[in-house]
Image (cartoon, rainbow, N blue to C red):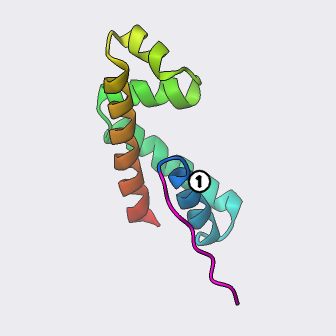
Amino acid sequence: MPNNVIHIKDDNADAVFFDYYCANSGGVSCGKDKMKKILQKAMREELTEKQRVCMTRYYLESKTIRVIATEMSLSPSTVCRHIQNARKKIRHIADYYI
């Protein structure tokens, strides 16, 4: 049996963790619902307001980092840092539940 090696990088980490979660949670449908609840709770309770706004605008509204930065009167690097820190928090929380 071949041993598959997956290199986790920033650009594929979310997909890798979600795939792992779905494979080990009793099915994709069940996994998606459970993961959705975990993510919603994490967004509400664990992120700062700026992290929540940046994540919402970036992932749900598909806005670019520069557009978000302009809207929030922040530098693009600050917006990027808010998104990165929020992803780390959410990933840490999701790891706890997996």
Image quadrant in which you'd find residue 72: top left
Instruction: Identify whether 83 is placed above or below 88.
Output: above
Query: In this image, 14 relative to 87: left or right?
Result: right
Q: Residue furthest bottom?
A: 1
Query: In this image, 51 relative to 61: left or right?
Result: left
Q: How many marks?
A: 1
Q: Main secondary structure of the magenta part?
A: loop
At x 63% / y 76%, what residue is drawn? 4
Question: At label 1, which amino acid type do we have?
Answer: Ala
Instruction: Identify whether 1 is placed above or below 80.
Output: below
At x 32% / y 37%, what residue is drawn? 47
Instruction: Identify whether 96 is placed above or below 4.
Output: above
Q: Mark 1 points at which residue?
A: 15
- On the image, the x and y values in percent for residue 39 come to 47, 46
- On the image, the x and y values in percent for residue 24 come to 59, 72
Instruction: Identify whether 46 is placed above or below 20.
Output: above
At x 53% / y 51%, what residue is drawn? 14
At x 29% / y 32%, what residue is drawn? 48
Image quadrant in which you'd find residue 52: top left
Q: Give the range drawn in magenta.
A: 1-9
Q: Quadrant of the N terminus?
A: bottom right
- On the image, the x and y values in percent for residue 53 come to 41, 24
